[in-house]
Amino acid sequence: MVFELRPVAWVRSLRVELLDDQWDGVSTTVELDDDVPSEALIGLEQFSHLEFVLVADRAAEVPPAPWRRHPRGNAEWPNVGIFAQRNKDRPNRLLVSIARLERIDGRTLFVQGLDGVDGTPVLDIKPVFRWNGPRGEVVAPRWADEIGLDYF
Amino acid sequence: MVFELRPVAWVRSLRVELLDDQWDGVSTTVELDDDVPSEALIGLEQFSHLEFVLVADRAAEVPPAPWRRHPRGNAEWPNVGIFAQRNKDRPNRLLVSIARLERIDGRTLFVQGLDGVDGTPVLDIKPVFRWNGPRGEVVAPRWADEIGLDYF
């Protein structure tokens, strides 16, 4: 079974290299695809944060890339399965990222902290509701905390 | 531009109807697709919450479904664009949902609060890190709070 998905928008950024960290320092916009009418954005300005589904189209597909690895190739972190990490080299190469919405100008969203490089296709844009995050205490191994130290 | 994406897993649930609410009461599992090796799950048991990207394959594609609507057809809520809501009738029909991981038995994940009906294709499984949610206060309009009152 295969699903054919089409970009609804595109990341525009001064960042073109596939770097891991410090996404807050990058000025980023998301621009609607020509096939999407502007009315799709009505009401979006009332939300402080948005969730984006991106395709990491320059990442390595799994397979042939391996089903497990040390996150970022760091041997000090455990050799875990691809579904126990969020790295971009994965089956279907989907990224899910939450960014702060700064403002909307026409068909362009100005966002902070979106971890997509210039030209990244956007498959979906969703508002962040106050209640759709994890409920209860979030437990994660230490390496997962460490990988976030310089992310933003 | 089109991306061809393949399910990596499937939702198995006693819920087959496309209902909106009360997902906590539904016993749900996620089972790896036959093409995915078990090693993809190594280390996943160390996380309390998982994020799933689902295809709402029985929802209405946008277009031809409209680019704006009242959420759930409720005229008391505003007629907003499809990217200002999280409903399943949308371009690419992608859902992003966070659920609590109860346990893993072989190639089956037992989860609580996953809002997918039986047979829903899963395109990705990611761990929830303590730091990848929204940063700062989350602001949302009142209707977005109200829609969550009976969700779980």
Image (cartoon, coloured by chain):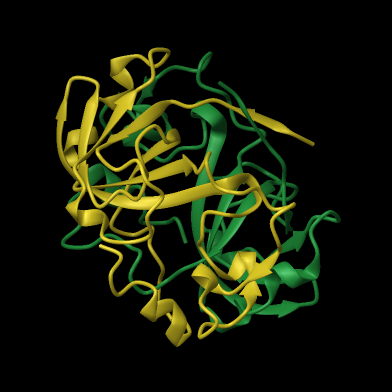
Chain colours: A yellow, B green
Figure check: A107 above or below B76? above
Residue B13 locus on image (x, y percent)? 72, 58
- Viewed as shown, does residue A77 lie left or right of A19? right
Q: On the image, which quarter does residue A145 sit in?
A: bottom left
Figure check: A77 above or below B38? below
Camera sees residue A83: yes
Residue at image x 56%, y 50%?
Answer: B53
Residue at image x 61%, y 49%?
Answer: A60
Residue B65 locus on image (x, y percent)? 50, 17
Closer-to-camera residue (A14/A138): A14
Residue at image x 45%, y 38%?
Answer: B87
Camera sees residue B79: no
Residue at image x 29%, y 17%?
Answer: A38
Residue extending furthest toward the right? B34
Quadrant location of the N terminus of chain B in the rendered image: top right
Closer-to-camera residue (A110/A68): A68
Closer-to-camera residue (A5/A72): A72
Residue A106 locus on image (x, y percent)? 18, 20
- Viewed as shown, does residue B55 lie left or right of B65? right
Residue A86 locus on image (x, y percent)? 50, 62
